[in-house]
Image (tube, rainbow, N blue to C red):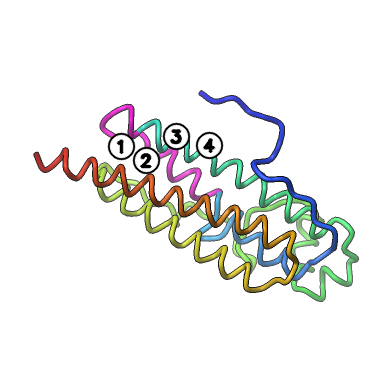
Amino acid sequence: MFKYFKKLNYPIHLNKTDVRMAKYIISQLGGPNGELGAALRYFSQKYTMPDDMGKALLNDIACEELGHVEMICEIFRQLTMNASLQEMEKYGLGDYYVDHGKGIYPQDASGNPFSVLTIASSSDVLACLSEDMAAEQKARSTYENLINLTDDQDLIDILLFLRQREIIHYNRFKELFLYYEKKLSS
């Protein structure tokens, strides 16, 4: 299994309330390119992998994605912790507040709840790994969009860390894809 360390992968210390960014950040929890979907996708797909090497890689990345879920939740919490009800309404989280207060609920930036419909999994190893590479690129792109929406350097640094992890995951999936592609064609 894995060992849980009671600290975040990257320290999160945001110094200001920013409900506008919180509304956007929540999409990386429950949106179509978010961390929760990635974790569930990789946990599901690891059973398709033909050997322990593939299973281990998908399991390891899935666990790391759960760490990213934790980071996104902490970012949202810090961005909304001192927000007034007026700020929540002003920046489009009034409906969110009605149902969840300032609690964490997986949804996208438009308010659509998390759905497993964005998770692809099949018995085709190469198809799964292709999906995984695409998912990592979409997550990277989403982080870049979030970076473009803020001027808070503390938040930008966290988002850059998460963006870099998406690139690393993409590269690991690509290596595994090429390995299996060669192995399956022999």
Does dot 1 land on a helix, a strand or a loop?
helix
Residue 157 vs residue 81: left or right? left
Cα gap from disc 4 to disc 3, whole angstroms:
6 Å
Marks 4/3 in contact by CB < 8 Å: the verdict is yes
- Reply yes or no: does residue 145 show up in magenta: no
**Tag 4 residue:** 63
**Tag 1 residue:** 48
Residue found at x 19% / y 45%: 181
Which badge, 4 or 2, comes first in the chain's sequence? 2
Q: Tell me if mark 2 has few (under 14), some (14-19) or many (20+) residues whose alpha carbon lies within 10 angstroms of its own.
A: many
Does dot 2 land on a helix, a strand or a loop?
helix
**Magenta residues (range):** 36-54
Does dot 3 land on a helix, a strand or a loop?
helix
| Residue 40 vs residue 151, the one in the foreground | 151
Residue found at x 51% / y 23%: 1
Residue 122: percent from left, percent from top: 30, 45
Q: Which mark is residue 59?
A: 3
Quadrant containing the C terminus is: top left
Three-letter code for the amino acid on which mark 3 is drawn: Asn
The answer to whether 145 is drawn above or below residue 98 in the figure is: below
Which badge, 2 or 3, comes first in the chain's sequence? 2
**Tag 2 residue:** 45
Residue found at x 24% / y 46%: 178
